[in-house]
């Protein structure tokens, strides 16, 4: 199914864009909003049915993957893991809320798509 392929491509693009923005001097919030905008617009051009579901799922997944990679491979992530289950729970809840915010932004971007009627 073509939607699965688009979903995997959008998740990959999201992770790549986040890693590129991480190395620039841009704030993390700005990078996430720009990435959500790009993914929302790209998927809105590719998918016709159930668009918001795919955009929301894609953005949630690449945000979770990005934060898990940060948690595992950075020094700050190792500090969080060393503090125990309480700190990991707080971190996970915060990441989920932030990912939900960015997924909502990406889903709202799909509303800007023009409805083109076939003639």
Image (cartoon, grey):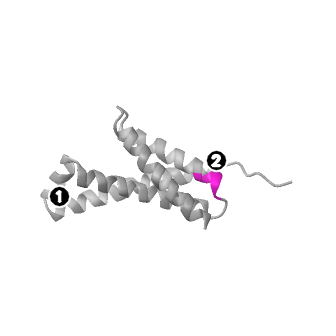
Dot 1 crowding, Cα within 10 Å, few <14, some 14–19, many 20+: some
- Which quarter of the figure is the C terminus placed in? bottom right
Judged from the image, the secondary structure of the residue bearing numbered disc 1 is helix
Q: In the image as oriented, which residue stretches furthest toward the right?
A: 119
Q: Residue 104, percent across and down?
A: 49, 54
Residue sitting at x 17%, y 53% = 78
Residue interval drawn in magenta: 43-47
Name the front one of labels 1 and 2. 1
Chain-order first, disc 1 or disc 2:
1
Q: Identify the mark at residue 93; answer none if there is no mark.
A: none
- Front-most of residues 111 and 31: 31
Vertical placement of 2 versus 35: above or below?
below
Judged from the image, the secondary structure of the residue bearing numbered disc 2 is helix
* Residue to which mark 2 is pinned: 112
* Residue to which mark 1 is pinned: 81
Q: Is residue 52 left or right of residue 99?
A: right
């Amino acid at each position: 199914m073509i939607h699965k392929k688009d979903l995997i491509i959008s998740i990959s693009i999201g992770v790549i864009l986040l890693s590129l923005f991480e190395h620039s001097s841009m704030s993390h919030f700005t990078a996430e909003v720009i990435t959500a905008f790009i993914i929302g617009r790209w998927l809105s051009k590719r998918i016709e049915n159930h668009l918001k579901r795919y955009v929301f799922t894609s953005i949630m997944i690449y945000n979770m993957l990005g934060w898990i990679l940060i948690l595992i491979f950075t020094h700050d992530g190792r500090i969080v893991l060393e503090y125990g289950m309480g700190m990991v729970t707080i971190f996970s809840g915060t990441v989920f809320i932030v990912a939900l915010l960015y997924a909502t932004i990406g889903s709202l971007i799909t509303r800007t798509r023009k409805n083109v009627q076939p003639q």
